[in-house]
Amino acid sequence: TNLCDQFRIYGSLDLGAALGILPVALFPLASLVYTNANKRWSMVYLALLSGVTKVFQSAFFSSITVATNRTVPAEMRSRMNALGSIGAGLSKAFGPLFVGIWMAFCLSLDTQDDSNDKSLPIGSLLAWFGIALVSGLIMFAVLRSLQERN
C-alpha cells in the first residue's frame, strides 16, 4: 500500500496503531455537543472519527500480517498464521466480555438524576480512555516485539 511504501512496514504499523486505536477515546466528546439543535454535527463528528479509525485499523491489520510473515522462516508461516487466527478468535470471544464489564463499571459511576444536568460524563470518558489506553499499549508492545525479532 502507499502507507507502507511511504513509512515502511513498522512505520505504517505505528501509524495504524496510533491513529486506529487511540482516537477511540475521542468518541465521548460527541455527547458534549449532542443537543436537539446539534444532532447533525454530532453525527458528522462520529462518522468522520469512525471512518478515520477504521481506515488506520485496516492499515494496521494488513501491515501486521506482512510483518509477522517476515519474522518466521517460510516453512513455519502456516503455523504462525494458525496461531494468529487462534489469537484473533480468542480476542473476539473474550474482548467483548471484558470490555462489557469495564463499560458497566465505568458507566455506573455517572449519576445524572437531573435531565438538565450537563456535567461531564466522567464514567463514559474513563471507559473510553481506558479502552484506548489498553488497546494502544497492547499494539505498541506487539510492534516493539516484532521490531526486536526482525
Image (cartoon, rainbow, N blue to C red):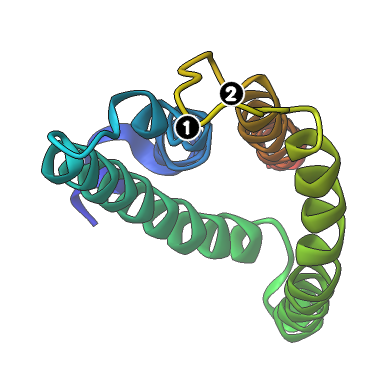
In the picture shown, does residue 38 fall above or below 84?
above
Crowd rating for badge 1 (residues with CA inside 10 Å; few <14, some 14–19, many 20+): some
The residue drawn where x is 51% and y is 62% is 66
Question: Which residue is nearer to you in this view: 114 or 10?
Answer: 114
Mark 2, mark 1: which one is toward the viewer? 2
Residue 132 higher or lower than 95, as above or below: above
Query: Where residue 77 appears, x then y in whole percent?
Result: 71, 78
Q: Is residue 24 left or right of residue 89?
A: left
Q: Nearer the viewer, residue 44 or 111?
A: 111
Judged left or right of residue 16, residue 145 is right
Is 113 above or below relative to 65? above
> Looking at the picture, how far across and down is residue 93, in whole percent?
81, 76
Q: Are marks 2 and 1 in contact (CB under 8 Å)?
A: yes
Secondary structure type for disc 2: loop
Amino acid type at mark 2: Pro
Q: Nearer the viewer, residue 96 or 140?
A: 96
Residue located 72% across and 30% down the image: 130
Looking at the rendered structure, the secondary structure element under dot 1 is loop
The N terminus lies in which quarter of the figure? bottom left
Q: Quadrant of residue 103?
A: top right
The disc placed on residue 121 is: 2
Q: Which residue is mark 1?
A: 28
**Circle 1: residue type:** Pro
The image shows residue 118, relative to residue 91, as above or below, that is above
Query: Marks 2/1: CA distance?
Result: 8 Å
Q: Residues within 10 Å of mark 2 (few under 14, many from 20)?
A: some
* Nearest to N terminus: mark 2 or mark 1: 1
Identified at 85% across, 64% down, the residue is: 97
How many badges with numbers are in the image? Answer: 2
* Left or right side of 112 for 99: right
What percent of the width, then of the height, locates residue 44? 16, 44
Q: In the displayed structure, does residue 56 sit left or right of residue 114?
A: left
